[in-house]
Image (cartoon, rainbow, N blue to C red):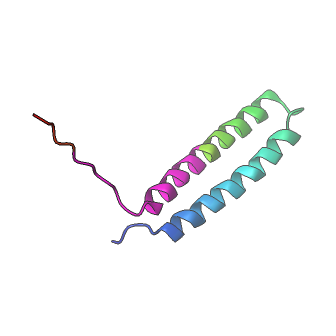
Amino acid sequence: MAGITLEQAQAQLDAALAGRAELTGVQETQVSSTTGGRKTIYRTLADANADVLFWDRKVKELSRVGIQTFRAVPCG
């Protein structure tokens, strides 16, 4: 099975950002709701934030051209 491509990772990141934006809007309108309702929204928002962080790292990882290594040789 082939690995994930940069385009796929970027699409997932875009979807995660859109989902987080929707949840943020819900959280703001639910502030006057019951405590139990807010906890559910916060947990969902935390999950959405974790998804965004995961896909952001994956996009950055796949965007790198290559890993550069430097070799240091001690003198003397």
Residue 73 image offset from top left, x and y in percent: 16, 42
- Residue 44: % across, % down: 67, 42
Magenta stretch mostly in which secondary structure?
helix
Q: Quadrant of residue 43?
A: top right
In the picture as drawn, the residue positioned furthest to the left comes out as 76
Is 10 situated left or right of 24 in this image?
left
Q: Is residue 75 above or below residue 35?
A: below
- The residue lying at 47 percent from left, 62 percent from top is 63
Quarter of the image for the C terminus: give it.
top left
* Residue at 83% from the left image edge and 30% from the top image edge: 34
**Residue drawn at point x = 79 percent, y = 28 percent:** 35
Q: Residue at x 41, y 64 (%)?
A: 65
Q: Which residues are magenta?
A: 50-71
- Residue 48 left/right relative to 28: left
59 in magenta = yes
**7 lies above or below 53:** below
4 or 59, nearer to the observer: 59
